[in-house]
Every structure is written in C-alpha cells, then in structure tokens.
Amino acid sequence: MAISISLEAAELLENFRWQVGEGSITPEIKERASKEMANIFIYLLSMSHDLGIDLIEAATKKLEESHARYPVEKSRGSSKKHTGLT
C-alpha cells in the first residue's frame, strides 16, 4: 500500500510539473489532480484500516506535536528547523 501511495503521489505531482505563477492551474489540471488525490485517499484509508490506525487521531496528534515544536510566535516567517528557533 505504501508503494501505491507513493506512486499516486508522484502522479499527482506530475500535474504541476510545469505550472508556474498564479492562475496557471486550469480546470483540466484541477480535475486530474482531484482524481489522483482521490486515489491517494483511498489507498491511505485502506492502509490505515489494515494497520488499525485512526487517521483523525494521528493527524490531530501530529498537528499538536508540530505546534509545540514550531510555535507561531517563534517560527512565523522562518525556515529554521525547530532546534534553531530562539
């Protein structure tokens, strides 16, 4: 499943390879991206079911961890890793 997710993510990325600037995303690109995103979502749901992982719980936990490591007041506008924030 992880391989399939990675392959579908690459197919999603391919839709944006030559897109630059605001307004460069056409309705056709958006439609193709939508289909690839749906494929990724389906594989991800299937994998999370097989592994017994609650995706909402895992995402909530990850966001909480990221917020703790990168507090807005220290990290906004910075590309530094959490260990480099003062």
Image: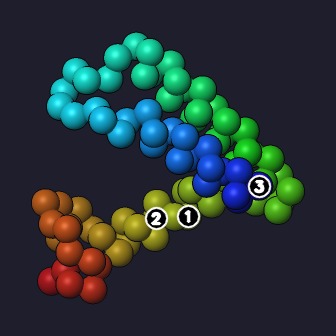
Residue 38, picture quadrant: top right
Q: Position of residue 9 (x, y in %)?
A: 55, 47
Q: Secondary structure at mark 2?
A: helix
Tag 2 residue: 64
Q: Quadrant of residue 16?
A: top left
| In the depicted structure, whether residue 27 falls above or below residue 1 | above
**Residue under pointer 1:** 61
Q: Nearer the viewer, residue 40 or 12?
A: 12
Mark 2 vs mark 3, foreground winner is 3
Q: 74 or 49, which lies in front? A: 49
Residue 82 place in picture, x, y as percent: 29, 79
The furthest residue to the top:
27
Amino acid at the residue labelled 2: Glu
**Horizontal arrangement in the rendering, residue 13 relative to residue 37 (left or right):** left
Q: Nearer the viewer, residue 54 or 79?
A: 79
Q: Measuring 53% from the left and 47% from the top, which residue is drawn there?
A: 10
Label 3, label 1: how many angstroms apart (C-alpha)?
Answer: 23 Å
Q: Residue furthest right?
A: 50
Could you say where residue 17 lies in the image, as x and y percent from the top left? 36, 39
C-beta proximity under 8 Å, tags 2 and 1:
yes
* Crowding at mark 2 (Cα within 10 Å: few <14, some 14-19, many 20+): few
Asked whether residue 78 is in view, the answer is yes
Cα distance in 3D space between marks 2 and 3: 26 Å
Classify residue 28 as left or right of residue 58: left
Q: For marks 2 and 1, give the CA distance.
A: 5 Å
In which quadrant of the rendered image does the N terminus lie?
bottom right
Q: Residues within 10 Å of mark 1 (few under 14, many from 20)?
A: few
Q: Which mark is residue 1?
A: 3
Q: Element type at marker 3?
A: loop
Q: Is residue 48 visible?
A: no
* Amino acid on which the number 1 mark rests in the picture: Lys
Residue drawn at point x = 32 percent, y = 23 percent: 25
